[in-house]
Amino acid sequence: MRAVVWDGQLRFVVDYPDPEIQPGWARIRVKTVGICRTDLELINGYLGFSGVLGHEFVGIVESCEESRWIGKRVAGEINVACGHCSWCQKGQGRHCPNRTTLGIDRLNGCMADYCILPISNLIEIPEGISDDRAVFIEPLSAACEILEQLTLSGSERIVVLGDGRLGILCAWVLSTVVSDVTLIGHHPEKLMLSAWNSVKIAQDSNHCTGTDVVVEATGSAAGLAEAMTLCRPRGIIVLKSTVAVSAPVNLSPIVIHELTVLGSRCGQFRHGLSLMEQHPDMPFESLITNRFPIEAAPAAFHRTAQNSAIKTLLDL
Ligand SMILES: [Zn+2]
Ligand SMILES: [Zn+2]
């Protein structure tokens, strides 16, 4: 099959072996895939991954033992949990220490004609949601995770730092429950595309001190330092990026102002999908700045690494 492989080198190949399914798993014919920042990090050595890349997809179930799934259009949760450990027993498979992750950690991903996932990871996409929107369920669910972790009254002031795709989606999601949300970024062309609902956009944080909740989605040490200056005493900083902060950061403001720092990663797809259904005007399509056929994946990665790119799609 065709596949985009990372093994120390980014390659498009046409002779990758088709994946075999085990009992309880489904084989999915992939239609469209998103490239995200995590993919760029993987080809920079994050997690030492090697294999087929890709974790954001929409596709059609081609084979599995439960016939009702065959032919269904699906997206899939990316963490594959062991099902036996204490975390799995508590329904917290996303923290299973034995988990593998689609296209990220020891499980081949979806930038290929076929990928495989446990049937329990699949979610059916309703007819009214296009493929291009469905590809956003994974990152939208990750943004929705903040609503799972924080109890918001609606009267908070929230600042989201970072006008990349995840920052934009976090601002949109938070604006569905809180009216005072400001998205701060340095790219005017991206900020223009991120206006939705009551989200305010700004290129600097001059008027944002004393904020109740700051969501850090820049993934940089400077972003974390800025978040600490904007957050009010006893406020909350949500860290939303998995990019390791490698520069030294002075953490004393966390102690002095008794800040809470909350790490936030993947979310449940049913939450992302239900938010998508409730808000048919959420303008995901405007975030698709580039699309390429799968054969052009190396060029697509190159384009995605440029500052002006928000979302790149690969069509199979
Ligand atoms: Zn991603
Ligand atoms: Zn487990």
Image (tube, rainbow, N blue to C red):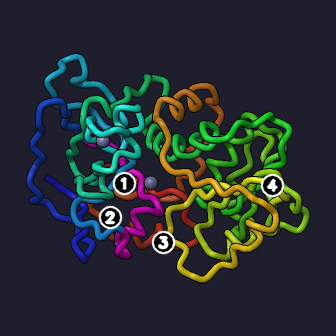
| Residue 297, label in figure | 2
Q: Residue at x 48, y 46 (%)?
A: 266
Mark 3 C-beta to ligand 1 under 8 Å: no
Kind of residue sitting beneath label 4: Arg
Kind of residue sitting beneath label 2: Ala
First in sequence: mark 4 vs mark 2: 4
Whether pointer 2 and pointer 1 mark residues with C-beta atoms closer than 8 Å, the reply is yes
Q: CA distance from mark 3 to mark 4?
A: 36 Å
Q: Is residue 282 above or below residue 260?
A: above
SS at circle 1: strand
Q: Is residue 177 left or right of residue 57?
A: right
Q: Nearer the viewer, mark 4 or mark 1?
A: 4
First in sequence: mark 2 vs mark 1: 2
SS at circle 3: loop
Residue that carries the numbered disc 1 in the rendered image: 314
Q: Residue at x 39, y 48 (%)?
A: 56
First in sequence: mark 3 vs mark 2: 2
Whether pointer 3 and pointer 4 mark residues with C-beta atoms closer than 8 Å, the reply is no
Q: CA distance from mark 4 to mark 1?
A: 43 Å
Report x, y in % for residue 155.
86, 38
Residue that carries the numbered disc 4 in the rendered image: 234
Kind of residue sitting beneath label 1: Leu
Q: CA distance from mark 3 to mark 2?
A: 12 Å
Kind of residue sitting beneath label 3: Ala
First in sequence: mark 4 vs mark 1: 4
Residue that carries the numbered disc 3 in the rendered image: 305
